[in-house]
Image (spheres, rainbow, N blue to C red):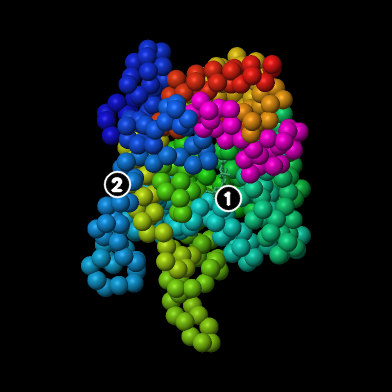
Amino acid sequence: MSDRSVVSGAVTTDVDGGGAGEIPALAPRADFPILAREVNGKPLIYLDSAASSQKPTQVLDAMDTFARTSYSNTHRGAYTLAEEATGAYERARKQVARFINASSVREVIFTRNTTESINLVARTWAEANLRPGDTVLTTEMEHHSNIVPWQLAAERTGARVDYVPLTDDGELDQAAYERLLETAKPKLVALTQMSNVLGTLPPVKEMIAKAHAMGALALLDGAQSVPHLPVDVRALDCDFLAFSAHKMLGPTGIGALWGRRELLEAMPPFLGGGSMIREVKMSGSTWADLPQKFEAGTPAIIEAVGLGAAVAYLSALGMEQVRAHEHALTRYALERLATVPEIRIFGPGAEARGGTISFTLGDIHAHDLATLLDRDGIAIRAGHHCAQPIMDRYCIPATARASFYVYSTSSEVDALAEALERAHGVFAL
Ligand code: C6P
């Protein structure tokens, strides 16, 4: 990684960003081989990092080298490769623990992704703790991964799910939140740290403090925050945090659940099988210590190494710089996109959001827009983004969504705005 990569959101002349007045990429674009390809004869402009980010050579090489030289199963053999593989896997856990400032490496459970991490809590903690009439409080702004597991838990336990409503500006209604804490007395508040549709960054620290004051635990969905902001579980004082490697420069197939040690220790296991036991008798079994208790079966070993390399790459960039870069780009994008005729941008202003912008353009369907932009080599996402309650709240079937990351530049924002202007012209005919 070059020294230049730590210059954040600066307005400079730069090979990674174009001419003077540009916001260059924070990370060297040459680190990301896929960004050199063309799509439909045009240079790829990748604006769908909120769905899945691209991987730098450093991550690809770390996985490749490990697979070529040190791969075997973990925690099982007494031979050299098994020790090396176990060491690499556990090093990745330490890197993740440090990245989120966990107080113990045992508090980091590797899962497949954010979805599995939340389901783990919604099966084990919820079944052990929820009783008929209890409430889990989530919000109208959540991804389905932070709604459906609680609905399923409620069906199994007789508890109910309540929702903090959204305001017209795409914020969580804080007065309603306080009312719901008072009236519903939830056992747990399940809250996103950043909306994957509106980009909103709710005031989670204050919301967690209020939840605790009312005796509720707080789970954070960090799928969109951990890749883009400094996240410190001790400073936030949350009880659980869920996130996915593939949105933070790492591979698919691995994510993490961080949980407070005493809570994880008290929770029953999630999946049963190899690796998660202390002793198995035909009359019954006992469980391994954390984190193995929650890691049944052969884990995603190569992917863990990739996640470790992704964390190292992001740490070298600096998460404050990542946030500053995306903030600068988002502020620029909100201004530039506002000049596109008939555009409607959802969510709050740049100060209260991350680098994800959802919009509609006149009555052009979001899917048509995404298809048209693809002809210009521009990748954006279209649909309900697994957040149908948000679509219902704003009475829309879908949005188009552009999202930024460490390799994004203001030239790409300009290309997006110009392509939208052309699309508007085509559909206006
Ligand atoms: N959002 C998007 O395009 P998984 O699929 O388990 O890695 O992540 C689920 C998830 C949970 N919470 C939030 C806030 C998310 O944004 C996501 C994934 C992608 O918005 C895919 S739908």
Q: Is residue 276 above or below residue 99?
A: below
Image point 37% across, 31% down: which residue? 36
Look at the image and give the residue range highlighted in magenta: 370-398
Which sits earlier in the primary sequence, circle 1 or circle 2? 2
Q: Nearer the viewer, residue 370 or 82?
A: 370
How far apart marks 1 and 2 lie (CA) works out to 34 Å
| Residue 37 at least partly seen | yes
Q: Give the side of residue 357 with respect to residue 139, left or right.
A: left
Q: Is residue 84 above or below residue 337?
A: below
Q: Nearer the viewer, residue 162 or 134?
A: 162
Q: Is residue 46 above or below residue 265?
A: above
Circle number at residue 219: 1
Q: Nearer the viewer, residue 411 or 195?
A: 411
Q: Tell me the amino acid under the disc marked 1.
A: Leu
Quarter of the image where one finds residue 12? top left
Q: Give the side of residue 84 with respect to residue 122, left or right.
A: left
Circle number at residue 61: 2
> Quick check: is 296 in the magenta stretch?
no
Residue 25 in the image: x percent, y percent? 39, 26
Image point 28% across, 67% down: which residue? 82
The residue at the far top in this view is 20
| Residue 356 at least partly seen | no
Image point 38% across, 21% down: which residue? 17
Element type where label 1 sits in the image: strand
Name the image quarter holding the C terminus: top right
Q: Are marks 1 and 2 in contact (CB under 8 Å)?
A: no
Q: Give the side of residue 26 with respect to residue 403, left or right.
A: left
* Number of on-image labels: 2
Please rate how many residues cluster around mark 2, counting C-alpha atoms within 10 Å: few if below 14, some from 14 to 19, many from 20. few
Image point 37% across, 14% down: which residue? 19
Element type where label 2 sits in the image: helix
Q: Is mark 2 within 8 Å of ligand 1?
A: no
